[in-house]
Image: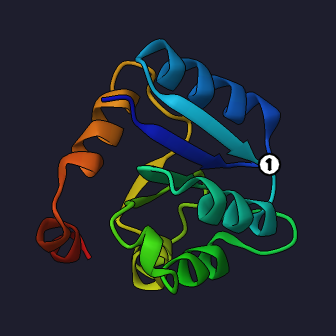
Amino acid sequence: MTHTILIIEDNQQNMYMMRFLLEKNGFIVIGAENGLEGIDQARRHKPHAILLDIQLPEMDGYAVAAELKKYGELKDAPIIAVTSYAMVGDRERILAAGATGYIEKPIDPETFVAEINRYMSMDRHDQERQQ
């Protein structure tokens, strides 16, 4: 089964790297450059997972994660924050907003896809325990 991943990321270099790694491993990738576009794409395509930057134009990642959690059709899609925003408490704050997991930038190309697969293989109970 082919899985669809939505990447909500405004930095083109980061978008390119994540897209390249995921597509190379058989994923279908949809991109969005800001939070509002990301929410629209998520509702339209119902991806299997959502990769979310925190620092975004229009609407930050915290607000995007909270908004995405309101839609029942997206309840099973893990939201994985992929961000360089690594201040004390940021991980906890994005998880509290609705993210399932957290990957720090710069991403490690050797482990990135395995990390995404790990989050996608978690059931809802496992996701809730992560938070």
Q: Position of residue 13 (x, y in %)?
A: 76, 29
| Type of amino acid under label 1 | Asp
Residue 104 horizontal side relative to residue 83, left or right: left
Task: State which quarter of the image contains the C terminus.
Answer: bottom left
Note whether 13 is above or below 62 in the view shown.
above
**Residue at 21% over, 76% down:** 128
For residue 65, which quarter of the picture? bottom right
| Residue in the foreground of this view, choosing between 28 and 91 | 28
Q: What residue is drawn where x is 61% and y is 46%? A: 7
Q: Residue at x 73, y 65 (%)?
A: 40
**Mark 1, residue position:** 10
- Residue 83 percent location from the top left of the image: 57, 53
Residue lying farthest top?
A: 24
- The colour scheme used here is rainbow
Depth order, front residue of 107/52? 52
Q: Residue 1's x, y, as percent?
A: 30, 29
Q: Residue at x 59, y 53 (%)?
A: 45
- Whether 18 is drawn above or below 109: the answer is below
- Left or right? Give the position of 112 relative to 58: left
Q: Residues within 10 Å of mark 1 (few under 14, many from 20)?
A: some
Q: Secondary structure at mark 1?
A: loop
In this view, the residue farthest toward the right is 58
Q: Is residue 82 visible?
A: no
Instruction: Give the left or right position of residue 123, taking residue 19 as reference.
Output: left
